[in-house]
Amino acid sequence: QVQVAESGGGLVQAGGSLRLSCVASGNFASIKTMGWYRQAPGKQRDLVAAIPSGSSPVYADSVKGRFTISRDNTKNTLYLQMNNLKPEDTAVYYCNAIILLRTWAQRDYWGQGTQVTVSS
């Protein structure tokens, strides 16, 4: 059983900061890629940032220079530091993990989402 769970969302004023965390737990061999996605009301879910194992992170153009993604492989934890937040960053943020199971099957797991609201 593999679970992915986010934490750290909330309400913040424009220009403020928030830090999201995501932990993958359960019985698996390794985590290949971890990433953050977001979905605003009435819009599709879009990639915010992702970090493959052993590779450099990638960011959506809209968050470059403001958001920083990082991961602690010893804790199976992913972080998203969000600075200089804007009202258009308001969305539900989802953690995604591509996980290699002990059966050598690769599966895609999602967290339940955490709300980030930025007031103007």
Image (cartoon, rainbow, N blue to C red):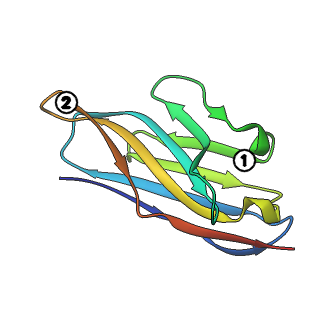
Residue at (76% x, 37% y) in the render: 61
Residue 43, given in percent of the width and then of the height, sits at 63, 57
**Across the whole image, how many numbered discs are drawn on residues?**
2
Q: Label 2 belongs to which residue?
A: 105
Asked whether, in this view, residue 64 is left or right of residue 34, the answer is right
User: Distance of mark 2 from mark 1, alpha carbons?
Assistant: 32 Å
Q: In this view, does 106 lie above or below 87?
A: above
Nearer the observer, 95 or 16:
95
Question: Is any atom of residue 111 visible in this view?
Answer: yes
Q: Looking at the image, is mark 2 or mark 1 earlier in the sequence? A: 1
Q: Which of marks 2 and 1 is in front?
A: 2
SS at mark 1 in the image: strand
Asked whether, in this view, residue 83 is left or right of residue 32, the answer is right
Q: Label 1 belongs to which residue?
A: 67
How packed mark 2 is, by other alpha carbons closer than 10 Å (few <14, some 14-19, many 20 or more), is: few
Whether the residues at callouts 2 and 1 have beta carbons within 8 Å, the answer is: no
SS at mark 2 in the image: loop
